[in-house]
Amino acid sequence: PRALRIMDAFVKAVEARAGRVNTKAVDQRETCVEFLGERIPVLLEERVIRTRHVLTEAEHRHSYQAPRWDYAPTGKLRIEMKERTSEPLRKRWADSAKRRLEDVLNDVVLGLVVVADATRARRLQREREERERQEAELRRIEAERQRREELERRQRLERQVESWTKAQQARAFVDEVERRAQAKDKSIEPGTELGNWIAWARRHADRLDPLNPPIPGKSAEE
């Protein structure tokens, strides 16, 4: 009965300060207090004394396993917050020789607010760090994309230069073949074997040349 009275007073004190008391879920027995948008698990429990169990005569006569320990209630109650904080904040209030738990419920509620504030600050810090991590990751991905794009552009340029060089070399070679053939009075007219080869070689050089056809936006003379 005393524990119920304390819990009733505790709940009213929390609600009077714009807090809420509820459970995590319908099927869970953990009680939580909500302050500043944070849920702080709270436990009201009675201190017990553990003593080694002394076998009774009945237990001596029977072979069943007797308990190893006996637990006796003390009537001493305490409220404890099951919330981890990096700061050394107070999270437990209990009956003492000078004061009973009922007399410090306001201190308990104030302590809950302090813990909730620290928990909120820690959560916001984690969220901020997570946002910064995500932003850094996005910057890394963008930098990698730009690096790959730049590499592809360079490689494409090098391939174009290589193809253009081959096209120039092929045209120069065909021109030299044509010049020597004319010097020896060989026929290079269309339909002849040499004439057909020269036409094919020039078409192949055109296919190699990345500037053929002309770049869009520039005239043929350019």
Image: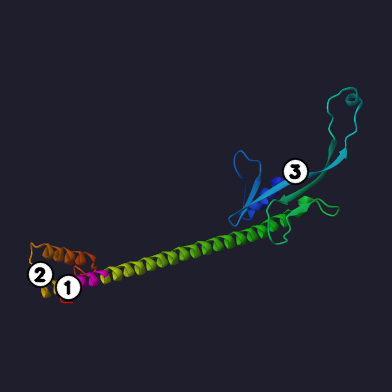
Secondary structure beneath label 1: helix
Instruction: Work out how far the residue at label 3 is from the one at label 1, CA to CA, in angstroms.
Output: 107 Å
Side of 2 where 132 appears, left or right: left
Instruction: Work out how far the residue at label 2 is from the one at label 1, CA to CA, in angstroms.
Output: 14 Å
Side of 3 where 191 appears, left or right: left
64 is within the stretch colored magenta: no
Which of discs 2 and 1 lies nearer the camera? The answer is: 2
Q: Position of residue 115 (x, y in %)?
A: 67, 58
Using the image, determine if residue 16 lies above or below residue 171: above
Q: Which residue is drawn at 78% across and 44% down?
A: 46
Q: Residue at x 85, y 36 (%)?
A: 70
Toward the bottom, the furthest residue is 222
Q: Which residue carries the number 2 mark?
A: 186
Residue extent of the magenta highlight: 166-174
29 or 95: which is nearer to us?
29
Secondary structure beneath label 3: helix
Residue type at the position of mark 2: Lys
Q: Earlier in the sequence, mark 2 or mark 1?
A: 1
Using the image, determine if residue 10 lies above or below residue 29: below
Q: Position of residue 17 (x, y in %)?
A: 63, 56
The tag on residue 213 is: none
Side of 67 where 27 appears, left or right: left
Residue type at the position of mark 1: Asp
- The quadrant of the image that shows the C terminus is bottom left
Q: Which residue carries the number 3 mark?
A: 3
Which of discs 2 and 3 lies nearer the camera? The answer is: 2
